[in-house]
Amino acid sequence: MSINNNKGNLIVISGPSGVGKGTLCRALLKKYSDIDYSVSATTRKPRPGEVHGKEYWFYSKEDFEKLIADNQLLEWAKVYNNYYGTPIDYVQEVIDKRKDCILEIDVQGAMKVKSKWSEGVFIFIAPPSKEELIRRITFRGTESDQEIKKRMSQTDEEMRCISNYDYVVVNDDIDKAVESIRAIIVAERCNITRLDSLKADIG
Amino acid sequence: MSINNNKGNLIVISGPSGVGKGTLCRALLKKYSDIDYSVSATTRKPRPGEVHGKEYWFYSKEDFEKLIADNQLLEWAKVYNNYYGTPIDYVQEVIDKRKDCILEIDVQGAMKVKSKWSEGVFIFIAPPSKEELIRRITFRGTESDQEIKKRMSQTDEEMRCISNYDYVVVNDDIDKAVESIRAIIVAERCNITRLDSLKADIG
C-alpha cells in the first residue's frame, strides 16, 4: 500500500484591502517551516537592502513583457507604470519540493490565478464586520475620506467574489485565524482529491 | 456582513479493523471539548456500570425495530443476534448545538451513513503499511491464523472503498494523526460549501 501526496499545494490567501492578509501570512511563515511563500516579479527598482529572489524578482520591462508573452505568469498587473506578477516557475519549484506555497494577493489577482491554477486552495480572509474594516483602514491614517469611500466600494465588489473561494476565514483574532489557515493547509494534504498516487494495493 | 456556520458537522472516522480508529477518537475527544461523539443504539444488555446514553442507548428488540421501520437510524447492523445502529436524532442534536459529532464506524457502516447523510465529513484512517496492520492485529493475540487471514481479506475489500471518502489520514504516529483529524475538523468549519448563511452584504 502506498498513499503519497508527492506535491505541495498552492495556498492563495486573499481578501479585501485592510483585512490583515499580510499580517496573517507573516505570522504563518514565521511559525511553520514547511510552508514557503511565492516571490513576486516586478519591474520597479529595488530599494536599498532588497534582494533579487527574496522581496521580489527584479526584472527589466522587456524581460517582464517576455514573461507575459510566454505565459510564464500566474497573474500580472500594471500599477503606477510598474509591472507586478507571480512567476509560475517558482511556485512549481516550491510545491515540487513537497512544500506548500503561500501566495498573498488581492481578490482581482486571486481570480486570475484561479483561471490558470484551479487546483490551488483559495482562502478568503473576511473582516469580522464592515465597521471593523473601516476602523482598520482609517487607523492607518494615511488615506483621505474620498480614498476610504473608494476603497469601501471596492470592498463591496470584492466581497461578491467570496463564493469563488474554497474557504472563508474571519480575521477576528489573529492567532485563531492563523490556526484556521494552518488547519486548512494540513487538511488539504489529506484531501482525497489531492492524493495523486493513491494505491489501495494493500492486498 | 454575516458569515455564520450555524451547525456542526458529522465527522465519520472509519477504516479497516485494527487501524486504531478507537484510539484516535478517544485521544481527540479527550483533547478537544468542542467535539462530541455519536452514541450508538443497541439491543444488547447493558454491562455493569454502563449508562443509557453514554456507552449506548439501550433498547428492546421491538423498540429498535421500530427505529429501523421509522427510518430513524443513519445505519444499523445485526451482530450475533443483537442490533447496533446510529440514531439520527442524537447526531442532529449535537450538530444543532454547533458542535462537531464524531462517529467511529467500520467501512461498511460508513458507506451506509454516506447514503443517508452525504454532507458528513468522511475520513478514512489508513495503516502505514499492510505489514504494520498485520502486526497490530496479531499483537492483540486474541485471534487465530484463520481469523487473521479472513480479516486481511476483509481489509483488502475495505481499502477499495477509500475513494468514497473525503480525506485519508495515515495512522503512522498517533499524535500526528490526531492533529490531522483536528485540522480537517477546523478546516471544514471554514469550508465555503458549509457556510449556510453567507451574506456578502458588507456594502
Image: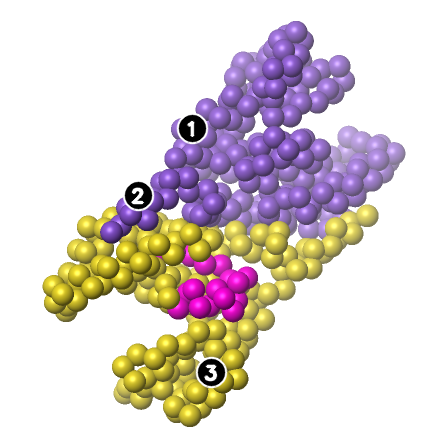
Chain colours: A yellow, B purple
Tag 3 residue: A68
The residue depicted at 57 percent of the width and 66 percent of the height is A98
Query: Where is residue B33 shown, x and y percent of the image?
Result: 42, 34
The residue depicted at 77 percent of the width and 34 percent of the height is B141
Task: Inspect the magenta stretch and tell me whether residue B120 lies in it.
Answer: no
For mark 3, give the secondary structure: helix
Tag 2 residue: B2
From mark 3 to mark 2, how far is it between C-alphas? 39 Å
> Which amino acid type is shown beneath numbered disc 3?
Ile
Task: Inspect the magenta stretch and tell me whether residue A117 lies in it.
Answer: yes
On whether disc 3 and disc 2 are found on a single subunit, the reply is: no
> Which amino acid type is shown beneath numbered disc 2?
Ser
Horizontal side of residue A65 vs B13, given as left or right: left
Magenta stretch bounds: A109-125
From mark 2 to mark 1, how far is it between C-alphas? 19 Å
The residue depicted at 34 percent of the width and 45 percent of the height is B199
The residue carrying pointer 1 sits among few (fewer than 14), some (14 to 19) or many (20 or more) residues within 10 Å by Cα, namely: some
The residue depicted at 60 percent of the width and 57 percent of the height is A194
For mark 2, give the secondary structure: strand
The residue carrying pointer 2 sits among few (fewer than 14), some (14 to 19) or many (20 or more) residues within 10 Å by Cα, namely: some
Q: Chain of mark 3?
A: A
Q: Chain of mark 1?
A: B
Horizontal side of residue A195 vs A167, given as left or right: right
Label 2 or label 1, whichever comes before in sequence order: 2
Q: Chain of mark 2?
A: B
Q: Nearest to the eye among marks 2 and 1: give it.
A: 2
Q: Which mark is residue B82?
A: none
Q: Which mark is residue B96?
A: 1
Q: Is residue A14 in view?
A: yes
Q: Is residue B175 in view?
A: no
Looking at the image, is A37 positioned above or below residue B16? below
